[in-house]
Amino acid sequence: MAVVGSMCLRNYRNFLHFSASNSNKRNLFNIVRRHICNIRGTPLTTVSKVRCHDLSRTGGHCVRSPGFTNTVSLDSCFRLGSVAGGLHRQQTSLYSTQKKDSDGGITGQILKSKLDELKTTGGPQEGQKQDTKSETGSDSKKDDKKESWMSSKHAWKLGLVSMAASGILIVGNLIYLWGSPLKDSEGNELEDEFSSLPKWQGYALRAKQGAHFFKKMIEEPSFKKLLPDPLKEPWYQPPYTLVLELTGVLVHPDWTLGTGWRFKKRPGVQYFLQQVAPPLFEVVIFTHEQGFTAFPIVDGLDPNGHVTFRLFRDATRYMDGAHVKDLDNLNRDLSKVILVDCDPKGFQKHPRNALLLKKWQGTDGDRTLIDLAAFLRTIALSNVEDVRPVLEYYSQFDDPLEAFKENQRRLQAEQEQKAVIEQKQSPLTGFGRSFLRR
């Protein structure tokens, strides 16, 4: 009588190790043992004690190991190989979902039915696989069609639609706000030049007028006269007006991660303000910075009150993308006005009244303000009738203050030389020396 060997069972144990879950390994192993006993009529207790062919699942064939006798038939090996192949090809979830049965009757019947199906059909039909793939493909296409507008490919379209909707809402609100007619205290509409027109046309024209006024309010200075009228006697009015830019001339903006925005004072700024303060100059801070930013900065720079007036961005004229300091609205004689700036766009309307300096980058040891104070005091003490020719002359140099210092050294050398010549030519000089010797 042929029996089944332990090596066969060892191969089935290895197969069950990767083909079944931990909860069903023992159950499946018992099923295989019972199936072997049913093939040869061997008692269940003797199956694990005998030896047989070493089965290997290679295309459903049985490979014989040398040195072993009492073998089973080829039909039995084929059936056992089919068991292994069927278990390998089918998902193990079929067996894990069944209820455990101690006698293994239901599980054995399911296993036999699967073996018969595998022998007759050779596995799942290709048509069924294709039908399954086609069904899953159609379902995925339907899902793609449903989610097509929410995909990333159409994100830019959704963005454009949302921006267009926002723009329409904003324009509609502005037309309603600027196009609505004025009302009196009782809520009655006041008549204007657009009251006789159709309502929609009146709203459109009023909104256009409001937009023009808003644009004009941004571009033009806030007042036609930025400074009050000059003082008259008995009050004293300084003869010259000095207009200073704040950022890049007196302070430098500095930003760090720990402190945020800070403004660094230029070396010698308080000395400079003291030297150019009244009675020589009327000092005006005229900056393109916002008032809420520049006002506390000026307070920190000028604790002694040398600055007479402060003008901010609302006093500038916006043209060509820059905030221009329009000196025509300053309400002062331009022949006595000196503008110090580091941006040529800021004084493009009055270049003859401007002195262009290099923008300060926050370096220590800078002496520009000390030299500038000497330059301005020289103009004021010389009683120059019109400052524009002087400023126009020094504007041709890359560094006007260095050119001024060079002229001062040359002038001083000429004066010293002239004094020596006059001293030698004077007849009183020899008489004085002889008198002192006596």
Image (tube, rainbow, N blue to C red):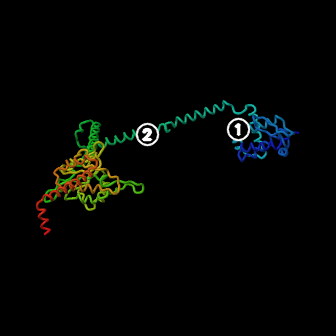
* Residue 26 tag number: none
Q: Position of residue 413 (x, y in %)?
A: 21, 55
Q: Which residue is mark 2?
A: 159
- The residue at 77%/47% (across/down) is 102
Q: Position of residue 223 (x, y in %)?
A: 23, 49
- The residue at 73%/31% (across/down) is 121
Judging depth in this view, the residue of 355 and 86 nearest the camera is 355
So how many labels did they put on this image?
2
Q: Position of residue 222 (x, y in %)?
A: 25, 48
Q: Which residue is mark 1?
A: 90
Judging depth in this view, the residue of 365 and 105 nearest the camera is 365
Visible in this render: residue 113?
A: no
Q: Residues within 10 Å of mark 1 (few under 14, many from 20)?
A: some
Q: Amino acid under label 2? A: Gly
For residue 4, side relative to residue 385 (left or right): right
- Please tell me whether mark 1 sits on a helix, a strand or a loop: loop
| Quadrant occupied by the C terminus | bottom left
Q: Residue farthest to the top?
A: 127
Q: Amino acid under label 1? A: Gln
Q: Are marks 1 and 2 in contact (CB under 8 Å)?
A: no
